[in-house]
Amino acid sequence: MKEQLRAHLLYLAEQGVQGLEIPGLPDNVSDNRAETDFNRECLQALWHRLENCTRCKLHRGRNNIVFGEGSPTPDIVFVGEGPGRDEDLQGRPFVGRAGALLNRILAAMGLQREEIYICNVVKCRPPNNRNPEPDEISTCSPFLAQQIDILQPRVICALGNVAAAFLTGRNAPMTVLRGRFYDYRGICVRPTYHPAAILRNPGYRRPVWEDVQELMRYIGKPVP
Ligand code: URA
């Protein structure tokens, strides 16, 4: 990613661009703007590579590809397993019942959806909300990897077993996986229960709250 950025900046320099300042703004603001715009463009380019995707069998039943959405420069990326019915219909992640609960968790963390980024391991809905199969994960996950490479968040929150297994590289129950940080492509990963699991089992509320508090402490923004 750094290489891509360097190549892009070299290209701009060759075109005669002398820095990326925006008149009237302090340097760090113009840097932030440049990074935001650059990341947004990279995400857009990646999204175009997925358009009309037929790489795996999930394309047969989908209405919309659910690429992901949120800040192009987030501190936190939330990764779920794959779109459900509502997400498939709207083309947006976590907009159904589980999404409503995720919104409430975010609000309790003092966050708005626009500040973070939300996406899934697979971008098309598995039929009848089954788990994505290994061939579907291996076909689609390079797109998640590239999203993470572009976004470079401080931390990733893996929601549920599928995202946790993929991002930690370990196949173990959430009771075993949660409670510590892992590494995915140089980024810290904190696994926790999926919001849909909390809807089925309210007993998961407390561990999820502990996990997200830990995550906020890690990025230096503890929940008061
Ligand atoms: N569940 C997921 O894992 N992802 C979504 O986008 C919605 C529900």
Image (cartoon, rainbow, N blue to C red):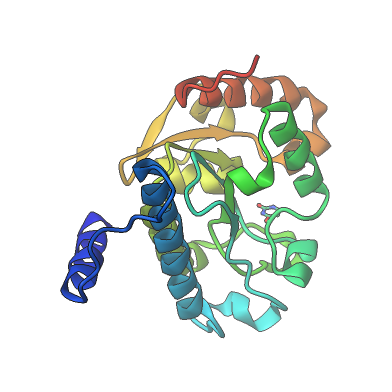
Image position, residue 205 (x, y; %): 74, 25
Q: Nearer the viewer, residue 202 or 103?
A: 103
**Residue 149 horizontal side relative to residue 213, left or right:** left
Q: Residue at x 54, y 81 (%)?
A: 51
Q: Nearer the viewer, residue 18 or 191?
A: 18
> From what the image shows, is residue 204 above or below residue 84?
above
Q: Residue at x 63, y 19 (%)?
A: 223
Q: Tell me where residue 78 appears, x and y as whole percent.
A: 57, 44
Determine which quarter of the picture holds residue 211: top right
Image region (quadrant) for ligand 1: bottom right
Where does the image place residue 161, in percent across and percent down from the top left? 58, 42
Quarter of the figure with residue 207: top right
Residue 4: name its quadrant: bottom left
Instruction: Decide if residue 13 is on the left or right side of residue 152.
Output: left
Kindly identify the residue that appears in the image at 50 percent across and 44 percent down.
Answer: 74
Residue lying farthest to the front in this orientation = 24
Nearer to us in this view, 62 or 175: 62
> Image point 56% across, 85% down: which residue?
52
Above or below, comparing residue 189 to residue 78 in the picture: above
Left or right position of 48 against 60: left
